[in-house]
Image (cartoon, rainbow, N blue to C red):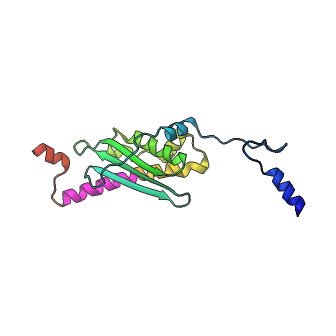
Amino acid sequence: MLRIAASAKRLVTTSLEAPPLGIRVPPRFYHERVVEHYDNPRNVGSFDKNDPTVGTGLVGAPACGDVMKLQIKVDDKTGKIVDARFKTFGCGSAIASSSVATEWVKGKQMEEVLTIKNTEIAKHLSLPPVKLHCSMLAEDAIKAAVKDYEAKRASATAGGQATTGEKASTA
């Protein structure tokens, strides 16, 4: 039993010690784009969820614990997304995916952002297969935000209320 513990102790090394001879452990690095978006995330924050021009998408991955909230602010007259914000609780890849998603949706039409696929986000960030769920969350958050905005707009028009853009044009 003592020999097993001694040999196991030799295999366990700290980050400052070199691995035992004959064992190569390749370093794992994030792509520079992931690191850039993690260190300097774009569009962090949130909007008032009760604003009729704001759509909110809240998605999560129970397996890894990542939670992503992505919000879009839409110009009612043009249907163009004028701003986007996110808050993400998760790993660096989840934060980077959220940051990229907010950059990509700004200035685009609602129909256009629905064509953004997780594979495009993953390719842009060079995410490894084990982190693909992060880009999937970003795609799902975009879709959920658009759906929320459209539901708000439908209930506002069904209720006989004018949208913000219509109020401004009649004033």
Q: Nearer the viewer, residue 49 or 108?
A: 49
Q: Is residue 155 magenta?
A: yes
> What residue is shown at x 38% (from left), y 54% (from top)?
57
29 or 9: nearer the viewer: 9
Quadrant containing the N terminus in the rendered view: bottom right
Main secondary-structure element of the magenta-colored stretch? helix
Q: Position of residue 8 (x, y in %)?
A: 82, 55
Would you say 62 lies left or right of 144 here? right
Which residue is at 51% across, 41% downward? Answer: 38
Which picture quadrant has residue 17? top right
63 in relation to 141, above or below: below
Q: Position of residue 134 (x, y in %)?
A: 52, 50
* Residue depicted at x 52% and y 61%: 62
Please state the extent of the stretch shown in magenta in the rendering.
143-158
- List x then y, in percent, for residue 45: 38, 46
For the C terminus, the quadrant is top left
